[in-house]
Image: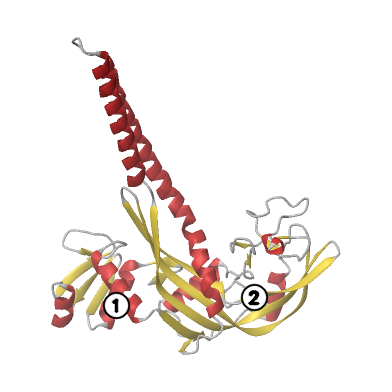
Amino acid sequence: MIVSGGIDPLGFVVDELAARGALIERSNGHAIAVLPAELAAQFELPETLALAGATRDQAIGCGLGSPLLDRLVTEVRGRLPVASVIWQAEPPRLPAADRLAARIVVRNGVADVLGIAYAPAAYLAGMFTWIAEADDRYQGMAMVVAHAATAGEPDAACTAAIGALLAGDDARVIDQRDARGAAGGVATIAKRIEIEIAPQLDEVAAAVARRRDRERMRIDDYFGSLVAEAKQPRRQVERGAIMARVAALRAEHAAKLHDLGARYTLRLRIQPVALAAIAMRVAEVRLRLRRRKGERELPLHIPPGARAPDALACVACLATTRAPILCDDALHVLCEACAPEIGGRPRCPACRS
């Protein structure tokens, strides 16, 4: 379940149990549930229980990593991998969309609005869980949304509205079976989820590296003291025996460091929880991009609830940007990371290929 764009594991557990016949009374941060006998036996739970976002006394935790949440997510993933809906929310009025489009900035070129009209569009939303393991285990959930055709990314306000839609908190939804038009977004969200969770993984990697370095210092100090003792024995020992002992210690030291590297290697697993193809009506802006003597047209979309046009997708890395730079040959869109400087001729992977 998603609340205001954020993940609500307790809400997901409560909704799933309620959908299976449980009676739920929820308040801030916890809930009381009465389960049918069959459901309680299926999950090996008491028929009356307390649920909480975190493990508490006399309450079953429903936070990330909890057994109950993991089992429900696994069952839901197997039962409903893809949903398809029509969202009947109204896009911004054309004059308002025109004002939003006028704010677009191209760092090394000019953007002109040629026209604006309403148009159908398909977005793909993906909810993913990620697990990073080294000497410890870290996990979390994240959601990404992308325009199926342009790979554009809606702003935070629209993403939060889509989160509410997927959580069932928006009545302007009609079930739909046809998901045509959204398949093109699958590769985009698969790549973009890596970008989305990168800051969290950086924190995890830094924590793992700190523990690895502390462990390595401890091992180095331990074997350093053993080698020093072996080189200066308290009684008379043949030099050959001393060298053999030192060699054995250094070999054991190297083996410990090898094991240390394997134990602190970060392994990442990303799994989709749910995918949703969302058909909606958007304000579509025809944008003309100009740089030097070249120009090209580009569609730009403003979906319902958005306070800014979709961020443009970089052709090099599929990250998004609201301050693009254009390559010289085909005026491809590049992000700040792929083209940090506006001077000179940006290196464009799409043109090189």
Helix, strand, or loop for circle 1? helix
- Of 12 and 257, which appears nearest the observer? 257
Q: Which residue is mark 2?
A: 301
Helix, strand, or loop for circle 2? strand
Q: Counting other residues with Cα less than 10 Å from the Cα at mark 1, is it few (<14), some (14-19), or many (20 or more)?
A: some
Looking at the image, residue 306 sits to the left or right of residue 160; the answer is right
- Of 78 and 89, which appears nearest the observer? 78
Q: CA distance from mark 1 to mark 2?
A: 34 Å
Q: Which residue is mark 1?
A: 16
Visible in this render: residue 172? no
Please name the amino acid that badge 1 sits on: Glu
Looking at the image, residue 20 sits to the left or right of residue 212; the answer is left
- In terms of image quadrants, where is residue 67? bottom left
Task: Quadrant for the N terminus, please.
Answer: bottom left
Residue 42: x %, y % from top left: 17, 77
Residue 347: x %, y % from top left: 71, 55
Please name the amino acid that badge 2 sits on: His
- Of 242 and 223, which appears nearest the observer? 242
Task: Quadrant for the C terminus, please.
Answer: bottom right
Identify the residue at image location x=36%, y=67%.
8
Sooner in the amino-acid sequence: mark 1 or mark 2: 1
Looking at the image, residue 123 sits to the left or right of residue 6; the answer is right
